[in-house]
Image: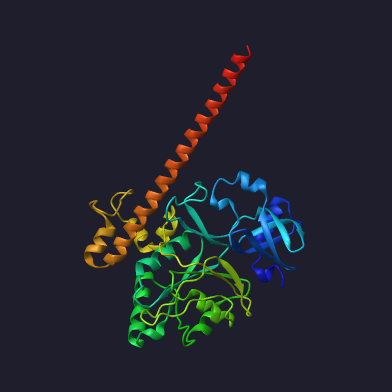
Amino acid sequence: MTLEDLGYDDFFESKRAERGSEGVRVARVIAQTRGGYRVKDADGEYVAKVTGKRMHIASSREDYPAVGDWVELSDVAGGQAVIQQILPRKTVIRRKSVGKGGGYEGKSDVQIIATNVDVAFVVEAVDRDYNLNRIERYCAIARDGGVRSAVILNKTDLIPEEERASKIAEIRGRFGDIDVMTTSVATGEGVSTVRDALEKGKTYGFLGSSGVGKSSLINRLLETDGIRTGAIGSHSERGKHVTTAREMYFLANGGIVIDNPGMREVGLPDAEAGIEESFDEIASLAGNCRFADCTHEHEPGCAVLAALGSGEMNRERYENYHRLRKEAEFFGSSALERRDKDRCFGKFMKTAKKDLKKRKGSYVD
């Protein structure tokens, strides 16, 4: 296996050249564990950890390696290595951390899902969890990180052909020309279509809620049972979620896939660019609004509201656009407030240290 088989290309080579580290050993992060990382290069796999210096200078979760990263290694021996640096990322999929505290050692509210991904497959089951707004969220965080999205409708054996066709039409009506594939892990239908879409040396991230069948689908693509999955419930027809860590897998045809734990919530970071691209028809209409800073909520002469009133624009999509914008704006302002607080606290500590030195000096005198 070569570095190119692992996804290495001219982008990363140019970044190495810029850093003057052409001769330094590089590897790709293929898994993150509680104790560190697993990395892979052309010669094999290694257990790796970051240097104490990197841990010291890290100011946020994004300063640590993530699955998909290319990293520079040192002290490679006995199946172990030390991660010295992270090469610049080509793309990154991230979300706002959810739950108590929401951060990494209190330093950040952003969680990296995967890096250097070429295509994000948004996996949605056709059962009771099917939700267009959720698909829209996944597409927004993917596009914000420079990643193209596609949709996989899984568990299609649970619904009749007419309903399947209706859901595909609904997605394309909402998202335009986005690629939509249908699969059934139970019957194997559509799996070969997904496999054929995976190009050699390209990386594909699988995103979706718990129980939609991401790991089972990847097992089918790998033609193995290497990823542990839960049993299907007799009442809900849903698989139990057992994936607890992000991990990269390599298909026989050369495609690279990343399995991710299911996400109950998809909190948006400050993903304004991704939202604007996801709702490009609104951005296009906005150019005809009377006011340049139009919020598309109540202003006279708003082209977006006019399209909504005439039925040209889907109301649910319009409402979801505003929900995502407000969420992203809230997170952005919250992050700014935290930075201001950190800055003020830093100034306070600096002043306190100076005062302490002065007092110590006066005691000596």
Q: Is residue 315 above or below residue 73?
A: below
Residue 155: give x, y in percent of width and height: 42, 81
Q: Is residue 329 above or below residue 35?
A: above
Asked whether residue 313 appears in the rendered view, the answer is: no
Asked whether residue 51 appears in the rendered view, the answer is: yes
Q: Nearer the viewer, residue 117 or 264?
A: 264
Residue 28: give x, y in percent of width and height: 65, 63
Residue 335: give x, y in percent of width and height: 44, 46
Residue shown at the point (58%, 67%) measured from the top left: 247
Residue 308 left/right relative to 325: left
Q: Nearer the viewer, residue 202 or 31?
A: 31
Residue 292 left/right relative to 124: left
| Residue 118 picture quarter | bottom right
Please count the marks in the image. Answer: 0
| Residue 43 picture quarter | bottom right
Residue shown at the point (62%, 80%) measured from the top left: 253
Q: Is residue 182 above or below residue 36?
A: below
Residue 156: give x, y in percent of width and height: 40, 83
Residue 297 left/right relative to 351: left
Dividing the image into 4 quarters, which one contains the N terminus? bottom right
Residue shown at the point (52%, 48%) measured from the top left: 105
Dividing the image into 4 quarters, which one contains the C terminus? top right
| Residue 195 picture quarter | bottom right
